[in-house]
Amino acid sequence: MKKQASLYVAILAGTFASSLALSAPLQPIPKESGVGGSVVVGVSAASYSSNMIAGPDGDLGTKTIDSLNNGPDSETNVAPIFTGEINYTFGQSRTQIFLGSALEDLVRYDLAFQAGVRQELQDKGIVYGGFLFSAIPTEVYADPYVTNSARPETDRDSTGLRVGWQDIMGSNFGVELSHREIELDDENSGDDLVSQSLITAQEQRLLSREGDHSSVTLSYKHVITKGHLLVPEINYHDFDLDGGAMARDRYGLNVAYFWTTPKFSLITTFFYAREEHDELNPIYTNISSEEEVDVVGASIVGTYNNIFDVKNLSALVSVAAGESDSNINFYDADVVSGTLGVVYRF
């Protein structure tokens, strides 16, 4: 078993992260100065399929395919989880600096690490901002359109910025904006097809996966009763990629239900997104329209607090499922996962 992020997080981060980006409420900033944070350790098992993603270590996907017209085969794997956040709070100024992957990001299956600052504005909410980076690059195929021979992997990294404001002016509304630059060590999409004169060099440029990814998210926290919270969210993502056939707009709707008690918590998330690509795909000339994708899924995350009578130590259990259904079968993807672990807050 190789050292890697949990399998389902890697797949969701590569394929469904934008649609799963649900704004779980930030934890209140402590009143006293000092070091704090959380550590998550566990194991995850997942069944997934994707023709584009090879996984964190390049050993999760199907290296050799025999057709560009078929959907991906399903793969199964088990992998460890180790992540968390460390922060330092300046109690008097209500300021907190942090590094890592926050618990609210784990709820939305986004493992982008972040270094940044949070500032409480008394009764006007919490503003935050930070630098985003890929702690563990996701492996994708350098040229995913090679058939009948092994496809080499390459690293996909993203770096950027995130800013947000929760409980704006003391209300229940929140907003978050992010911008990331996506880079591949070797972006060779379509090389094999050009060598066979199946597409031209000009058409090949439409397949580039590098470029910019910007998003805006609007959320609202509705307190049903004590311990019961509903958080609906709408989001928009602009994948301004170099390849026009890969560039796309994504419109998403997410709803999460939080049930918390002193002993346990349960978070249920449902999401739907629609993607519309900018230009026709030069490979699939039989498709008369640009690629269109529907993304649907759900997750349940549960914690049981103070296990073994250890304060701040919680058991963590989660299950998640997501499906990305394209009008081009080759780009279909799906994942079903289960995770068991512990969370320690300090």
Image: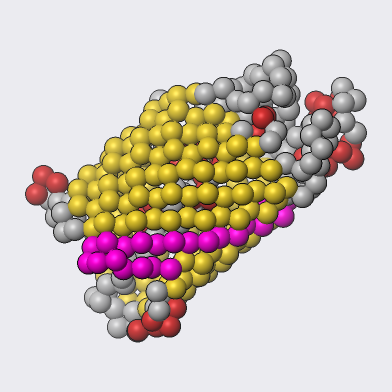
Residue 94 seen in render:
yes
Q: In the figure, residue 143 lies in which quadrant?
A: top right
Q: Residue at x 48, y 61 (%)?
A: 233
Q: Would residue 196 appear left or right of 172 to someone viewing this image?
A: right
Q: Residue at x 62, y 29 (%)?
A: 51
* Residue 178: % across, % down: 57, 63
Instruction: Residue 225: say if magenta.
Output: yes
Instruction: Residue 298: say if magenta.
Output: no
Question: What residue span does the magenta drawing correspond to?
Answer: 220-241
* Residue 4: % across, % down: 44, 36
Main SS of residues in magenta: strand
Residue 208 seen in render:
no
Q: Would residue 121 appear left or right of 247 to someone viewing this image?
A: left
Vertical order, 102 against 288 (above or below) = below
Task: Specify the farthest residue to the left.
Answer: 309
* Residue 40: % across, % down: 31, 47
Q: Residue at x 65, y 37 (%)?
A: 326
